[in-house]
Amino acid sequence: MADISKTLPLTRSSVIAAHELVKPHIHYTPVLTNTTLTTLASTPQTPEALADTPWAGQEPAKPVLRLWFKCENLQRVGAFKVRGAFHALERLCLDEEWVNGGGREKGVVTHSSGNHAQALALAAKTMGIPATIVMPAISTPSKIAATQGYGAKVLFSGSTSVEREAVVEEVIKETGARLVPPYDHPDIMLGQGTLGLELQEQVAAMIAAGHVQATKVSEHGLDAIMTPCGGGGMLSGTAISCEGTGIQVFGAEPEFEGADDCKRGLEAGQRIEKVSTLTIADGLRTPVGAYPWRIISDKRFLRGMYSVTEEQIKKALRLVLERMKVVVEPSAVVGLAVALFNEDFRRLVETEGGKGGWDLGLVFSGGNVSVDALGKMFAPPEPAQGERAEGTLGKDGRKIAENVAG
Amino acid sequence: MADISKTLPLTRSSVIAAHELVKPHIHYTPVLTNTTLTTLASTPQTPEALADTPWAGQEPAKPVLRLWFKCENLQRVGAFKVRGAFHALERLCLDEEWVNGGGREKGVVTHSSGNHAQALALAAKTMGIPATIVMPAISTPSKIAATQGYGAKVLFSGSTSVEREAVVEEVIKETGARLVPPYDHPDIMLGQGTLGLELQEQVAAMIAAGHVQATKVSEHGLDAIMTPCGGGGMLSGTAISCEGTGIQVFGAEPEFEGADDCKRGLEAGQRIEKVSTLTIADGLRTPVGAYPWRIISDKRFLRGMYSVTEEQIKKALRLVLERMKVVVEPSAVVGLAVALFNEDFRRLVETEGGKGGWDLGLVFSGGNVSVDALGKMFAPPEPAQGERAEGTLGKDGRKIAENVAG
């Protein structure tokens, strides 16, 4: 990565500058709307659905929501991570000291078993820079093959962060390669933030073109954006991209086994640095990074964090797969799960949005999930197939009118 | 349905007229391209991959293909069927005799356990016409609920076609309702054909806008369209929509348990009227209808039929889900499976398309599949997840460069 001293300030104009650099490398991913999901989000949950939740016995909230989905699952390598990776390398290449010191030849290095590995491998290959990716030896063969497929050198390590970092250190010592971390760096944050810019721009264009949302036509563009939060690169970058626009930014986390570290950190007034969770939202198992935290913990940038259960994530995932007909990974639907099931958030929208409601942008962060994993997630299929699907949807206590996408 | 005597002639201009009628009711579904799938289709299969096929020992074909996917899985009710249903009812409403005879009040009736049930229910509700849908009592509760959700009256029957038709007859006797069959009527064919018009128009617009396909920029628009074929409404309608355009039309069928009735019928010179198959492509289990057959068996309209195995359908389905990140039902990928795996078709493209290759339009006919069904389809997941995914893709003997959608 570029030295911190050489990074741009964390402002909206720096995100715009980042967008100029990454635009040629990335897909301008579509923004989709969906009648079924927008209707469902705007329908109160039933009292029965709230029975086993912290909101049991309360009057269900009556928010009006129009949902806009930024489809980074359709991004290159299947996730938003390419934005940060390309931005990091483009910024490095602008650093004369690094280039003149033979940086391009010495290459870059990272450790990752997930989407960042493939993203950096692709970016490095595209820009003619050698890349070494340290992956836990237990990584799935398909992910290793994909990373190698982009021409990256893959080294194996143990699976703890100490073991992985030790191998990275060795690579740096031997080759002089520069570390490109997955989220904890301003260049990564600014790169990921470019999706926020596009989302704002696309929703404005769709509204100008007379795009009608289920309940009523939007008049004013986005009121809020909510993104999933793991390491916080995307959330902080998106928050920076909204600076001065009046758009409120929210983060969404799984709550399983303490995966809601960011929310808990905000409550405690201090970043939580360690998390050990096996939430199905596997992209969000990591604690929030130090640089993203600076933005996320700043009230001027972030309005609030909300969390959801594993069951709520699965329900949202099923809805997206079956009703919207796009493939997303579990991490991608955590924001939608908040919008559908978290009564604190829904009450806020009801109170502040009133009858006009809110236009809410949600980010489908990635789509890298195998059908085997999906099958496992929704197993076991003992009773009649249809019955189970019905039951799961029916539990929301809300009737869905039409099995429609688009 | 309108009396046959009152239907339009089976010509391209009738499809254009049908499009004017249905346009206000349907989604203009997107046409997507995909680098990975286009690259894979343009890469020869390995000799090993052909080992257990009719082409064992032959030199693998070297077609150049650029694929364009018409996404009717994103259509209302999740399938192209709404096109025919809306067209049928719009045409009925133009029939003064029917209207003056109280037709609108007497309503419409059909029997279906699949996408046609929901399509007709939606169309009838939209147009203020009462609808009765006869469904086998064993239909999945979610499908029954969805059909009722559109306000249709659902009656139950046994699952054989004799039992179903008996209930329909009763309804007609009691109410005077008009039968709207799922495919075997010119109005349905012309309605489904509207997707062919849109596909032609969209590909031309994308090419004009400089849309680049993986291997090279297209110069001339579509060379061919291939659609799945069950009852034949979509295939025949699409063929009619291509009349006079120079675009060649192909049909794709599963071959499991004789589901390739249309292909076999063409070889025998006679329509096969009975099929009993449990292919996973459950939308294609029905034999081709009499009216569609007139078009499909006419060399001026249809160039040829090709079939694929259950395994090839599953492989194509996995590729679409994991690489393209859209949800499709098994029936929807039968054309893609032909393009990827059927050496007869691939040889034809190599021979006739030469180095310039073919631009091939494929129709994703529907997306109505539950995650439970998908899980079951790709079970059992005993060995390591990644290994299986890899193995399945690897078997094609073709390396896929990038996990990209769009």
Image: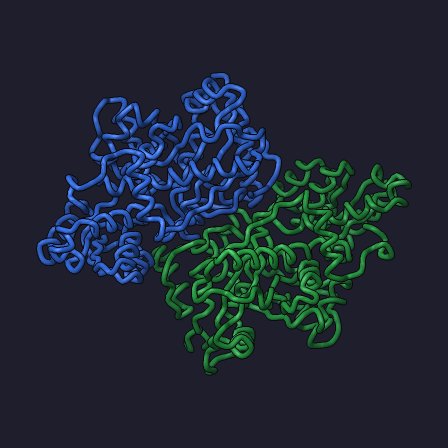
Chain colours: A green, B blue
Q: Position of residue B36 (x, y in %)?
A: 56, 36
Q: Nearer the viewer, residue A125 or B161?
A: A125
Residue A89, position as x, y percentages in the image:
77, 45
Which residue is found at the position 27% from the left and 59% from the top? Answer: B125
- In terms of depth relative to the viewer, which is nearer, B330 or B5? B5
Closer to us: B246 or A306:
B246
Depth check, front residue: A406 or B143 = A406
**B64, above or below B232, in the image:** above
Q: Is residue B48 visible?
A: no
Q: Residue at x 36, y 55 (%)?
A: A385
Residue A280 x %, y %: 57, 58
Q: Is residue A202 visible?
A: yes
Quadrant hosting residue A305:
bottom right
Q: Residue B202 at x, y = what percent?
A: 46, 40
Which residue is at 28% across, 49% downward?
B85
Q: Residue furthest left?
A: B173
Q: How many marks?
A: 0
Residue at the (22%, 40%) spot, across then down: B185
Quarter of the picture containing the C terminus of chain B is top right
Left or right position of A192 against B33: right
Judged left or right of residue A225, residue B4 is: left
Q: Is residue A108 above or below residue B132?
A: above
**Residue A398 falls left or right of residue B145:** right
| Quadrant housing residue B16 | top left
